[in-house]
Amino acid sequence: MKLSRRQLAGTILATAAGTAIAQTPPTNPADELKAARDRLKAVGDTLAKLTVPIETEPALQFKA
Amino acid sequence: MAAISEDVFFATIPELNQRLTSHEFTAVDLARAFSDRLEKLGPRYNALALALPQQAFHKAEEVDKEIKRGRLRGPLQGIPYGVKDLISYKGRPTTWGAKPYAGQVFDYNATVVDKLDGVGAVLTGKLATVELAGGPGYRYASASLTGPCLNPWDRTRWSGGSSSGPGAAVAAGLVPFSLGSETSGSIVTPASYCGVTALRPTYGLVSRHGAMALSWTLDKLGPFGRSAEDCGLILQVIAGKDSKDPGSAGKSFYYTPQYSRPMKELKVGYAPVDFDGHVEPSTRAAFAAALSVLKDAGIPLVEARWPQFPYGAILQAIMGSEAGSIFETLITSGQVDQLADQMQIAGLKTCLDIPAKDYLKAQRVRRLIQEEFSKLFAEVDALIAPGRPGPATRIEQRLDAVTPPAAGAAENPAGFQGIIPAGNLAGLPALVLPCGFADHLPVALQVVGLPFSENTLLAIGREFQARTDWHKRRPPA
């Protein structure tokens, strides 16, 4: 299955805003770690919303 | 000993080569002059990690003997250079810019160092890097064993990172050229901020053997120089198959300006909003003038669009997962707490928690991004975009702050704002060309092309630099 460019753009635009970074720097290591985990979760949430055709293999043996 | 005039410190590789082979000065003269300058001025910018004067003089003496015998090895013979301090040089410290690795010594050279040694280039020093090439992210310019690298154009500004020293050292005339690395933006950013020409090669074109790994599927090594031609000459030497690098593409690169297509036959894509609403107001005049230069050169510019993937998130998932694995021992041993930047410490710790499903999903979406770029490059030969949306940031400025959308951006989200993570995800080459000034600080274009299209990018760069002199400007003494 191939997604059209329009379908792809629609899916992705809907999720692209979800990766905003924390606005103020945390003041101690525990808060810093929490902020990092929040960023990680935002990345995961963004990825979860993306649709990928089932036959698409990951670029593990990456060649440009 | 011949006197070395100030202009030599800002000469291109062909100019230096011509003066060496015509015996205006010797390789030892040149190595001594550049070594003295690097040791004297490098610390002024926090650009120097390690000076190597004795090794440089020894190599330069060999080169002089060869030149005397008429054994010429090409334009890089006798030319001093520096490498980012994540590239190994046998028997001397390679710190990766990070305190936990301050005493690290390798017993072998990186492949790129051996290749440059083979053509007679003279290594004069290791240059500053952001710790661990920035890892999964850092908040302040001070995230380096050598402190914040200062911009030669204004020492209250940052040089950019993570290849901070390679950018600043070329800009300040401390080395004629240097090698840096890019995982996502680490060549493009310092070249843009420091006003030097630099090339991020196609993924796999240049061996990374002997260089610190941050992300196996994203890391690239590339040159900083005085012109597009310099970058082509350097790339020809450092590119090529290397069985010691699993990511090696097995391809060579031959710099062939003689076979360049006429500019009028090229088609270059761009998004007007990138040069207006997406950049800081102070830069717009410089970018508008740069576009005019390209048009005057007869290069057809066409408006182009691409799908808006969440490039940053995809890149973070891939780089974070791979960096977590690479630095697992650093993280689990607790030595990670010795790093300078709190955001990087926390970021590395959480890298170990990235789910496999996120990594694989990101790598699958990456395939789609490659497919989309293939379609786009069926319509255009290259893309141009600003190197960075503004001039160099202030030293104390937070680097992780969200930049509010500039005026006009909200109405038109099209454009190539994510070209740095996108280009890195797709393994695309990018050439950075200084194109003017804003607030007395350099700004630059980036020209991005298909994998292995470096000669096309360099041809565009040569044409631009034949019509401008931004790449020849020197920072204040």
Image (cartoon, coloured by chain):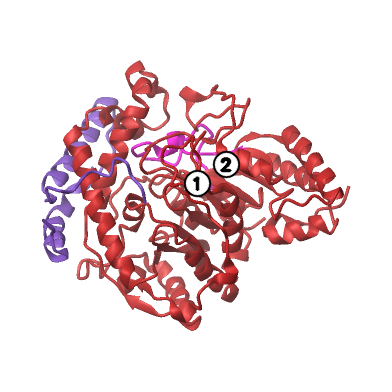
Chain colours: A purple, B red
Instruction: Reply yes or no: does residue B258 show up in magenta.
Output: no
Determine which of the numbered discs, if any, sits on residue B40 in the image: none
Q: Examine the residues drawn in magenta and state their main secondary structure.
A: loop
For this rendering, which residue is in front, B472 or B112? B112
Q: Which residue is mark 1?
A: B206
Tell me if I can see residue B84 in this picture.
no
Determine the residue positioned at 26% across, 27% down.
B352
For this rendering, which residue is in front, B442 or B56? B56
Q: Which residue is mark 2?
A: B112
Of the 4 image quadrants, the one containing the C terminus of chain B is bottom right
Q: Contact (CB < 8 A) between labels 2 and 1?
A: yes
B278 on left or right of B14: left
* Outermost residue toward the top in this view: B333
Mark 2 and mark 1: span between their CA atoms?
8 Å
Q: Is residue B456 above or below residue A12?
A: below
Q: Residue B283's spot in the image, x, y percent?
A: 42, 67
Provide the chain ID for the residue under circle 2.
Answer: B
| The residue stretch that appears in magenta | B126-150
For this rendering, which residue is in front, B198 or B259? B259
Q: Residue B407's spot in the image, x, y percent?
A: 27, 68
Q: Which amino acid, mark 2? A: Val
Q: Which amino acid, mark 1? A: Val
Determine the residue positioned at 21% across, 62% down.
B307
Q: Residue B98's spot in the image, x, y percent?
A: 47, 29
